Image (cartoon, grey):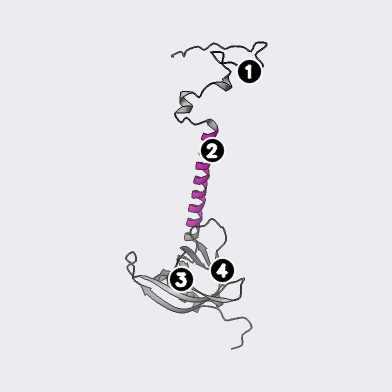
Amino acid sequence: MARGRRVPVRRLRPGDGGRRRGDRGVPLDDRPLTRQTQEGGVSGAAWAVVVGVALLLVLVAALWGSRTTALRRRVGSFACARSEGRDGPWSRGVAQYGATRLYWWRRASLLPRAACVWTRGGIVVLEREIVRVDDAPTGVVVARCQVTRERHGAPYEVHLRMSTEAYAGLTSWLEATPSRVGTII
């Protein structure tokens, strides 16, 4: 075991004013910066901040990954992009069929609730267009829909982009709407 160089410890003497002095009699607070600090050495507090920020980023990434995986694994969920206009901008997300509602979550969000909730009876497909994309062999469907939000009664148009299989599921779900309560046939 190698021994390090011994440094003498100087005790405070009466008349020092309560300040420790370095080896050369210069007060420690008045010494010039050491070579380590001049060359960019980082203090312990700065390292703690860097490690804290890194841990926070890892935590946020883990929460986002967990949320995305949980949304994709839900029964009745499918990848669906949403836009207010046909040409975009498109917001990627995941949609899920409920008993009486269609839920849509943004992909790049940590919120636990859906960004849009549309009532089943308030969704009307006005037009659909199959767009050829290199990634999808069968293409994707852009459906122009008139929707009514659950909380806001005013209908508005929205464009939904999804796979052809997801579109077939959406139209089947809409057509299988149970009859309205209180309607006489």
Q: Amino acid at mark 3?
A: Leu
The residue to which callout 2 is attached is 49
Q: Nearer the viewer, mark 4 or mark 2?
A: 2
Image quarter where the C terminus lies is bottom right
The residue to which callout 3 is attached is 160
- Is the magenta region chiefly helix, strand or loop? helix
First in sequence, mark 3 or 1: give its number.
1
Q: Is residue 130 visible?
A: yes
Residue 80 horizontal/vertical position (percent): 45, 66
The CA span between labels 3 and 2 is 43 Å
Over which residues does the magenta segment extend?
Answer: 45-70
> Mark 1–mark 4 contact, CB under 8 Å?
no
Q: Amino acid at mark 2?
A: Val
Residue 109 horizontal/vertical position (percent): 52, 57
User: Does residue 68 belong to the magenta stretch?
Assistant: yes
First in sequence, mark 3 or 2: give its number.
2
The residue to which callout 4 is attached is 117
The CA span between labels 4 and 3 is 14 Å
The CA span between labels 1 and 4 is 68 Å
Image quarter where the N terminus lies is top left
Horizontal side of residue 135 vs 28, given as left or right: left
> Mark 3–mark 2 contact, CB under 8 Å?
no
The CA span between labels 4 and 2 is 40 Å
Q: Amino acid at mark 4?
A: Val
Q: Residue shown at 46%/76% (left/top)?
A: 144
Q: Nearer the viewer, mark 3 or mark 2?
A: 2
Q: Residues within 10 Å of mark 3 (few under 14, many from 20)?
A: many
Q: Residues within 10 Å of mark 4 (few under 14, many from 20)?
A: many
Q: Is residue 99 visible?
A: no
